[in-house]
Amino acid sequence: MKLLIIALGFSASAIADEPNLERQKELRNMLAHDCGSCHGLTLKGGLGSSLLAKDLANKSDEFLVNTILEGRKNTAMPPWKPFMTEQETLWLVQKLLKQQ
């Protein structure tokens, strides 16, 4: 399979259900505006905690994806499951973890 992917000119990450470019733009916009309204426009924290890579580094992808999709009981963090898939959420988490 890997040889087929390489032969066709696709990267492995492109095959892994990466959102299309339009959806990536929507997810980045959601992060900047919707998440940013609580976590701060620079994601350094506010009502919600910091979403900077250094502050998320000790948390597993599974924990972060679950937190985003299911929200956090008894906090202002709502569930985002109605607005994004698990794969889209994982993509967003990976982007957050790679930011400088």
Image: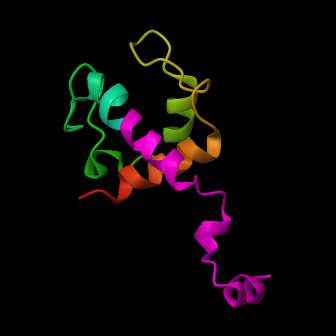
Q: Is residue 60 visible?
A: no
Please state which of residues 60 and 47 is positioned toward the viewer in this rendering: 47
Q: What coloring was used for the rendering?
A: rainbow
Residue 2 is left or right of residue 66, and the answer is right
Q: Quadrant of the C terminus?
A: bottom left
Q: What range is drawn magenta here? A: 1-30
- The answer to which quarter of the image holds residue 6 is bottom right
Q: Quadrant of the N terminus?
A: bottom right
Residue 39 is left or right of residue 8, and the answer is left
Counting from the top left corner in percent of width and height, residue 71 is at: 51, 22
Q: Is residue 41 visible?
A: yes
Please state which of residues 45 and 16 is positioned toward the viewer in this rendering: 16
Extreme-front residue of the structure: 22
Q: Residue at x 37, y 38 (%)?
A: 29
Please state which of residues 67 and 99 is positioned toward the viewer in this rendering: 99
Relative vertical location of residue 83 with respect to residue 100 in this rendering, above or below? above
Q: Residue at x 61, y 67 (%)?
A: 14
28 drawn magenta: yes
Residue 89 is left or right of residue 34, and the answer is right
Relative vertical location of residue 51 with respect to residue 7 in this rendering, above or below? above
Counting from the top left corner in percent of width and height, residue 88 is at: 57, 45
Counting from the top left corner in percent of width and height, residue 80 is at: 53, 25
Q: Residue at x 63, y 74 (%)?
A: 12
